[in-house]
Image (cartoon, rainbow, N blue to C red):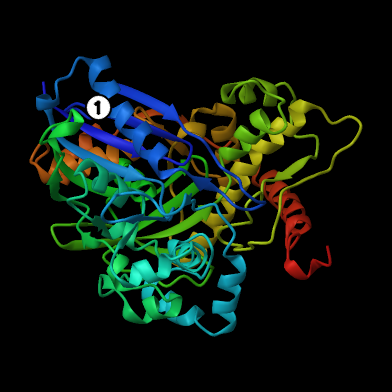
């Protein structure tokens, strides 16, 4: 037997998954790692812990599945996007913790860029909005705030990368500094039409070009793993940001096909083919992938807090002992009791883009129970997804026929049923829900001929369960209106001029 190994480096855990030729899982290993919150709105990771957890699960999964490294034909990498790392090229030592995509420390910097009139330039070249979410302002912050960083960067001593670049650097013992087009497109420094780093954007953020990795296709052989790592000479052959990888893993390879990933955040992407659309509804255009020199794009809406709201119920509020316990608790009540939860812990993403929004639970009464709060938390994920789909429909004019879903929270039948009720279309959960890792595996396997073509993969996608709408459309509209009222109460809470 031969396998493809997917390294799935996420926001809260590192995972490694082995896939066989049928696209079935042959082994999986996972480790959570530490989340650092130095100040309100700041989120960091230790880059060395990211690496140690990722290589640990890579070797662990081979042992569990009794698979030898020589039976692995390729490695595919998928990663939390926008998270920014800078390290010393000579020593490989990070100069600072990784600044995570959820981090809001550069919100005021982004406000200044908007005030200086850069919004149209950024949207035209990158397809993005100016926001602290993306990597560019995080790079600028590290250069400005880590002693000596700017001078070292200007001397060419430092390297920037998103997590994919960091993993390849480590896997190759510092021989290779690359990223793929999908990750590059999330930095706010990359022209998605000319498909290259852009000098005007670099000047806007005062980022030296010498920091940047080489940009490559999403499916090609980049390098082989160094011999000292227990995966000797296995080719690294596929890379994509986690949401683009999930779109590919769901085989949404035709224009109009859409998927939503219910992970730490939620990310809804619609394939738009070889056209990069301009959103009129505050969504972003992004590179989906480039294979064989052919670039395909997607329209995307990003939700900062999706499944992370369940983690907060567990770790912050402590009303559940484990994430799976949220389902039975939410099902202990027949409805939300008119309690609405806006989980804007890190601001609001698309289509609102309010970095100053903060979390709110509204509608509390003496009769409110932990069950109502748990149900409102789960439902908040579905409401945010609905907001994005309304915006995508307004941009594309394409009526949604179905929504393919994946991610950890997609295991919740209650959530997916409520999602179908809100949307009024079927929600389809595939037999293999590890579609982020599967997409990375597909990209890598295609590059080495393990799978002959994208068309040959079509038969591997199978539905495990379909959730059909069950409530009247009038009821769904009334619930959505109530959600918007709750949103209004969370907006602008942490604006610097609030007087607090």
Furthest-front residue in this view: 148
Q: Observer-nearest residue: 464 or 146?
A: 146
Q: Quadrant of the N terminus?
A: top left
Q: Is residue 288 above or below residue 496?
A: above
Q: Observer-nearest residue: 228 or 369?
A: 228
Q: Position of residue 128 (x, y in %)?
A: 45, 68
**Residue in view at x 60 percent, y 36 percent:** 418
**Residue in view at x 34 percent, y 29 percent:** 432
Q: Quadrant of the C terminus?
A: bottom right
Residue 148 as seen in the image, left or right of residue 158 = right
Q: Position of residue 125 (x, y in %)?
A: 37, 76
To which residue does mark 1 refer? 18
Q: Position of residue 83 (x, y in %)?
A: 44, 53
Q: Is residue 205 above or below residue 316?
A: below
Residue 155 as seen in the image, left or right of residue 70 = right
Within-10-Å neighbours for mark 1: few <14, some 14–19, many 20+: many
Residue 334 as seen in the image, left or right of residue 2 = right
Furthest-right residue in this view: 366
Badge 1 marks a residue whose secondary structure is strand
Q: Position of residue 119 (x, y in %)?
A: 50, 79
Q: Residue 115: name its quadrant.
A: bottom right
Q: Is residue 144 above or below residue 115?
A: above
């Amino acid at each position: 037997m031969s396998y493809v190994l997917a390294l799935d480096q996420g926001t809260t855990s590192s995972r490694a998954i082995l896939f066989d030729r049928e696209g079935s899982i042959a082994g999986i290993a996972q480790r959570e790692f530490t989340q650092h919150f130095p100040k309100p709105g700041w989120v960091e990771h230790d880059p060395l812990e990211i690496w140690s957890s990722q290589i640990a699960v890579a070797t662990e999964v081979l042992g569990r599945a009794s698979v030898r490294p020589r039976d692995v034909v390729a490695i595919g990498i998928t990663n939390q996007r926008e998270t920014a790392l800078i390290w010393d090229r000579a020593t490989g030592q990070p100069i600072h913790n990784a600044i995570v995509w959820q981090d809001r420390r550069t919100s005021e910097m982004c406000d200044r860029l908007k005030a200086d009139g850069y919004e149209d330039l950024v949207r035209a070249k990158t397809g993005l909005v100016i926001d602290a979410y993306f990597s560019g302002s995080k790079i600028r912050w590290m250069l400005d705030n880590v002693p000596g960083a700017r001078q070292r960067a200007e001397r060419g001593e430092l390297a920037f990368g998103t997590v994919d670049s960091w993993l390849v650097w480590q896997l190759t013992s510092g021989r290779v500094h690359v990223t793929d087009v999908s990750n590059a497109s999330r930095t706010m420094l990359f022209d998605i039409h000319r498909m290259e780093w852009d000098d005007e954007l670099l000047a806007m953020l005062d980022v030296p070009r010498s920091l940047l990795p080489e940009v490559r296709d999403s499916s090609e052989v980049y390098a082989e793993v160094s011999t000292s790592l227990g995966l000797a000479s296995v080719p690294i052959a596929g890379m994509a940001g986690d949401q683009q990888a999930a779109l590919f893993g769901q085989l949404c390879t035709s224009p109009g096909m859409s998927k939503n990933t219910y992970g730490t955040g939620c990310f809804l992407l619609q394939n738009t083919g070889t056209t990069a659309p301009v959103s009129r509804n505050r969504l972003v255009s992004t590179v989906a992938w480039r294979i064989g020199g052919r670039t395909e794009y997607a329209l995307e809406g990003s939700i900062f807090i999706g499944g992370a709201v369940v983690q907060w119920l567990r770790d912050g509020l402590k009303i559940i002992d484990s994430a799976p316990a949220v389902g039975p608790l939410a099902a202990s009540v027949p409805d939300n009791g008119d309690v609405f939860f806006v989980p804007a812990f890190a601001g609001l993403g698309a289509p609102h883009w309010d970095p100053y929004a903060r979390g709110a639970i509204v509608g509390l009464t003496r009769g409110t129970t932990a069950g109502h709060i748990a149900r409102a938390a789960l439902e908040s994920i579905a409401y945010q997804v609905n907001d994005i789909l309304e915006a995508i429909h307004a941009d594309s004019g394409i009526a949604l026929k179905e929504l393919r879903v994946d991610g950890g929270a997609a295991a919740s039948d209650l959530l997916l049923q409520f999602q179908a009720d809100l949307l009024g279309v079927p929600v389809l959960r595939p037999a293999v829900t590890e579609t982020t890792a599967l997409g990375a595996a597909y990209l890598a396997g295609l590059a080495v001929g393990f799978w002959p073509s994208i068309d040959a993969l079509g038969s591997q996608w199978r539905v495990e369960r379909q959730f059909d709408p069950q409530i009247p459309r009038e009821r769904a509209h009334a619930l959505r209106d109530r959600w918007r009222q709750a949103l209004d109460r969370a907006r602008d809470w942490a604006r610097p001029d609030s007087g607090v």
